[in-house]
Amino acid sequence: MGSGLKTLSGKDLVIILANFGFELIKQRGSHMKVRRIVSGHNETLIIQNDKIIPVGTLKSIFNQASKYIPKEDLYKHFYNE
């Protein structure tokens, strides 16, 4: 796989996840909640709203999102080639 995580912001993540059908439903303080409904089930992710997401947090968001989206599809958005 690639050489490392990209530098992404919270807004970048909302845009990336929107490509997979997630919508921003709530923002409170420094966190945003995005959700999509698939086959009647809610799939929800919490994203930190920072200009630069820390590496550990970004890895955590990637892992959480991969519960709903195949890692192969997410990888190009989160990692450098």
Image: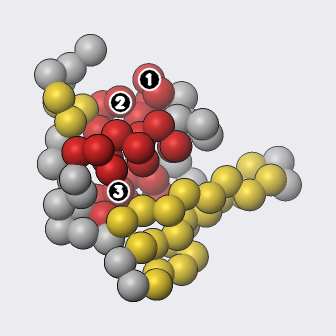
Residue at the spot of label 1: 72
Real-space Cα distance between discs 3 and 1?
16 Å
Q: Is residue 22 visible?
A: no
**Residue at (47%, 81%) from the top-left corner?**
27
- Nearer-N-terminus badge (3/1): 3
Q: Quadrant of residue 42?
A: bottom right
**Side of 7 where 36 appears, left or right:** right
Residue in front for this viewpoint, 35 or 60: 60
Tell me which label, 2 or 3, sits earlier in the chain.
3
Residue bearing the label numbered 3: 13
Amino acid type of the residue that numbered disc 2 sits on in the rendered structure: Tyr
Q: Image quadrant of residue 36?
A: bottom right
Q: Is residue 42 left or right of residue 81?
A: right
Judged from the image, the secondary structure of the residue bearing numbered disc 3 is helix
Q: State the CA–CA distance, disc 2 to disc 3.
A: 13 Å
Any part of residue 81 in sight:
yes
Near mark 3 (Cα within 10 A), the count class, few <14, some 14-19 or many ≥20, is many
Q: Position of residue 18 (x, y in %)?
A: 47, 57
The residue located at (41%, 44%) in the rendering is: 60
Q: Is residue 23 above or below residue 66?
A: below
Q: Which mark is residue 75?
A: 2
CB atoms at circles 1 and 2 under 8 Å apart? Answer: yes
Instruction: Name the outermost residue toward the top.
Output: 1
Mark 1: secondary structure = helix
The amino acid type found where label 1 is placed reads Glu
Q: Residue furthest front?
A: 56
Name the amino acid type tagged 3.
Answer: Leu
Give the SS element for disc 2.
Answer: helix
Tell me residue 16's x, y (percent).
Answer: 38, 52
